[in-house]
Image: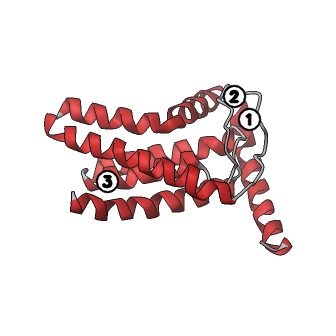
């Protein structure tokens, strides 16, 4: 990436960071972003959603198993296949001190939380109706935004992660058709 592109990304990241700063002092936002970032760890939120859907309707057990299996593949591809090519430093090493979060071990780019969130939202959308689809993407946006709010990712990291997650989710639809 040349210096001109890097400067544009840095300026974009700084604008979003400044936009989110007031939320870092608003207790409900601190709680929401702390919870969202923790639930995004290892895709926990999405596995819980798969389990809840299966418990509510036993015909969805297969869907829950498919979702969890595909989430494992998505995580492996992103964390072992894509992230090692980028060595982008995180905005902070442990996150903003106002948030209690797990310290990540991989590079900042792209965001694994954003990728898995949007991946899961796309996969779950295959089995859902309109209101649920809106809910899945709302959860994905909150999880992705939380990573910038807690200062463990740059905004451009989450946008790239979201695009990767959506792309992999669409490819997963093809795989699901073969199963």
Spatial separation of the CA atoms under disc 2 and disc 1: 7 Å
- Total label count? 3
Give the crowd class for mark 2: few <14, some 14-19, many >=20 residues within 10 Å: some
Towards the viewer: 86 or 143: 86
Residue found at x 35% / y 41%: 68
Q: Quick one: quadrant of the N terminus?
A: bottom right
The image quarter containing residue 32 is top right
Q: Nearer the viewer, mark 2 or mark 1?
A: 1
Q: Using the image as rendered, state which of residue 64 and residue 21 is in the foreground.
A: 64
- Vertical side of 98 occupied by 172: above or below: below
Left-right relation of 119 to 98: left
Whether residues under marks 3 and 2 lie with C-beta atoms below 8 angstroms apart, the answer is no
Query: Badges 2 and 1: C-beta atoms under 8 Å apart?
Result: yes
**Mark 3 or 2, nearer chain start:** 2
Q: SS for tag 3?
A: helix
- Residue 12 drawn at (x, y percent): 75, 61
Q: CA separation, marks 3 and 2? A: 31 Å
| Snapshot quadrant of residue 21 | top right
What residue does disc 3 label? 125
Q: Residue shown at 30%/48% (left/top)? A: 131
Report the side of 44 relative to 162 (left or right): left
The residue that mark 1 highlights is: 95
Q: Residue beneath label 2, please?
A: 99
């Amino acid at each position: 990436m040349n210096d001109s592109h890097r400067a544009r990304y840095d300026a974009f990241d700084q604008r979003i960071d400044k936009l989110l700063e007031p939320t870092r002092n608003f207790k409900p936002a601190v709680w929401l972003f702390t919870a969202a970032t923790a639930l995004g760890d290892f895709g926990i939120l999405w596995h819980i959603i798969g389990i809840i859907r299966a418990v509510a309707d036993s015909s969805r057990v297969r869907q829950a198993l498919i979702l969890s299996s595909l989430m494992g593949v998505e995580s492996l591809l992103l964390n072992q296949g894509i992230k090692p090519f980028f060595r982008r430093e995180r905005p902070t090493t442990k996150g903003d001190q106002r948030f209690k979060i797990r310290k990540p071990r991989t590079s900042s780019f792209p965001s694994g939380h954003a990728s898995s969130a949007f991946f899961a939202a796309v996969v779950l959308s295959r089995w859902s109706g309109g209101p649920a689809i809106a809910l899945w993407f709302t959860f994905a946006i909150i999880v992705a935004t939380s990573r910038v709010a807690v200062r463990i990712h740059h905004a451009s990291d989450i946008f790239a992660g979201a695009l990767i997650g959506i792309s992999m989710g669409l490819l997963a639809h093809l795989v699901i058709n073969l199963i």
